[in-house]
């Protein structure tokens, strides 16, 4: 699918670290307060169809889950152009950008990726998600990821929805990922039960481990802290 295909769903996904002066327990509320500022930005309201803020689980985690990131935001966009237009919107620059350092360790643009969705398994999203950021092996091209899910996959027991996001080539420094996997569960206890005794990478669909660089992968077990609409 191309950017002009009517059935393409585009996202902005940012992998966030909190301002180090902000306690982990206070991050979700500070992030909700920041998100509320978007109601004052007409361009954000027009171009962002939905927001799903996911904060890192503070419960027992899969063995390979990372704790040096604090959350992931999944923004469903109106179209591909919206990913670029938001950064130059005067209201967003005046209202939201000055508040970003209060909540995050860097400006959002410096940790945001643009991707298009590919649904692997349909179902409800639930309130807990395993997120895996992947870099493809040097022997593959990023476009090769799109063909992998054509085969049958077997998600871990209890997973309700599986989504693969294929990342655009333009990426901030330090965020060189080709794909982002969302593995949705009904709630946090169900996710932790399904992953008990196994790492997040060990739970990937069978096609993906051989295609990705395991050492550069980022695994985050998270709960939804805010959604809109």
Image (spheres, grey):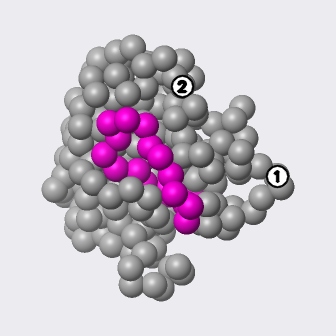
Residue appearing at x 19%, y 52% in the figure: 228
**Range of residues picked out in magenta:** 149-172
Can the viewer see residue 175 in this picture?
A: no
Q: Earlier in the sequence, mark 1 or mark 2?
A: 1
Residue nearest the viewer, comparing 4 with 43: 4
Asked whether, in this view, residue 226 is left or right of residue 106, the answer is left
Q: Tell me the distance, in whole angstroms, between the alpha carbons under discs 1 and 2.
A: 24 Å
Q: Which residue is mark 1?
A: 138
Q: Position of residue 199 (x, y in %)?
A: 54, 25
Residue nearest the viewer, comparing 11 with 16: 11
Q: Is label 1 in contact with label 2 (beta carbons under 8 Å)? A: no
- Please, is residue 25 above or below residue 169 in the view? above
Q: Position of residue 85 (x, y in %)?
A: 43, 71
Q: Which mark is residue 93?
A: none
Residue nearest the viewer, comparing 184 with 178: 184
Name the front one of labels 1 and 2: 2
Q: Which residue is mark 2?
A: 199
Residue appearing at x 39%, y 14% in the figure: 60
Residue appearing at x 71%, y 49% in the figure: 211
Q: Position of residue 191 (x, y in %)?
A: 34, 29
Q: Position of residue 34 (x, y in %)?
A: 27, 41
Asked whether, in this view, residue 114 is left or right of residue 196, the answer is right
Q: How many C-alpha atoms fall within 10 Å of the one at disc 1: few (<14), some, or many (≥20)?
A: few
Residue nearest the viewer, comparing 31 with 74: 74
- Please, is residue 144 above or below residue 61 in the view? below
Can the viewer see residue 36 in this picture?
A: yes
């Amino acid at each position: 699918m191309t950017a002009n295909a009517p059935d393409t769903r585009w996202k902005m996904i940012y992998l966030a670290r909190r301002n180090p002066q902000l306690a982990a327990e206070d991050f979700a509320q500070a992030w909700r307060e920041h998100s509320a500022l978007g109601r004052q930005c007409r361009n954000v309201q027009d171009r962002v169809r939905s927001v799903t803020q996911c904060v890192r689980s503070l419960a027992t985690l899969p063995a390979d889950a990372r704790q040096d990131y604090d959350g992931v935001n999944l923004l469903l966009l109106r179209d591909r152009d919206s990913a670029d237009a938001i950064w130059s919107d005067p209201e967003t620059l005046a209202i939201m950008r000055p508040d970003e350092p209060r909540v995050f360790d860097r400006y959002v643009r410096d940790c945001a990726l643009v991707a298009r969705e590919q649904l692997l398994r349909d179902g409800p999203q639930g309130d807990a998600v395993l997120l895996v950021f992947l870099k493809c092996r040097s022997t593959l091209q990023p476009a090769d990821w799109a063909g992998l899910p054509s085969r049958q996959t077997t998600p871990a027991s209890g997973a309700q929805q599986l989504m693969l996001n294929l990342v655009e080539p333009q990426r901030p420094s330090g965020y060189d990922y080709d794909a982002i996997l969302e593995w949705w569960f009904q709630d946090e206890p169900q996710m932790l039960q399904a992953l008990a005794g196994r790492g997040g990478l060990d739970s990937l669909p069978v096609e993906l481990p051989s295609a990705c660089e395991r050492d550069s992968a980022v695994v985050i077990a998270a709960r939804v802290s805010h959604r809109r609409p």
